[in-house]
Amino acid sequence: MLRHKSAQKRARQTEKITDRNKKYKALIKGSVKRVQTEKEKAAAETEFRKTTKVLDRAAAKGIIHKNKAANLKSKLAKHVNKAK
């Protein structure tokens, strides 16, 4: 058990932040998968736009690194461009 009040508070804050990050990361994974599984180009492009917004928001909030967001967007853009 944590003895100091500040350590106890920090543990509570860490739990809340971890839960929030898990939810956001699950949202990212789901939106990325939706883009990757899309076969038609038009549908893939709309999903790609939505996913880009989600990735940018996550990078801005510090949930994922900005370079990771950029790498994912690049990978998805290649996939969308290959779609027919």
Image: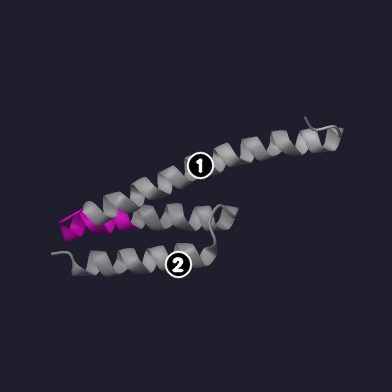
Secondary element under disc 2, as helix, strand or loop, is helix
Earlier in the chain: of badge 1 and badge 2, it is 1
Magenta stretch holds residue 28: no
Taking the spot 35% from the left edge, 46% from the top edge, the residue there is 30
Q: In this view, does 10 lie to the left or right of 21?
A: right
Taking the spot 45% from the left edge, 67% from the top edge, the residue there is 70
- Amino acid type at mark 1: Lys
Which mark identifies residue 22? 1
Secondary element under disc 1, as helix, strand or loop, is helix
- Estimate the x, y position of residue 56 in percent, counting from the top left: 48, 58
Taking the spot 19% from the left edge, 58% from the top edge, the residue there is 42
Say whether marks 1 and 2 touch (CB < 8 Å): no
Give above or below for 45 relative to 3. Answer: below
Extent of the magenta region: 38-48
Foreground mark, 1 or 2, reads 1
Residue matched to label 2? 70
- Estimate the x, y position of residue 81 in percent, counting from the top left: 23, 69
- Estimate the x, y position of residue 69 in percent, counting from the top left: 46, 62
Mark 2: few/some/many CA within 10 Å (<14, 14-19, 20+): some
Give above or below for 20 relative to 58. Answer: above
Taking the spot 30% from the left edge, 51% from the top edge, the residue there is 33
In the picture, the quarter occupied by the C terminus is bottom left
Name the outermost residue toward the front. 1
Mark 1: few/some/many CA within 10 Å (<14, 14-19, 20+): few
In the picture, the quarter occupied by the N terminus is top right
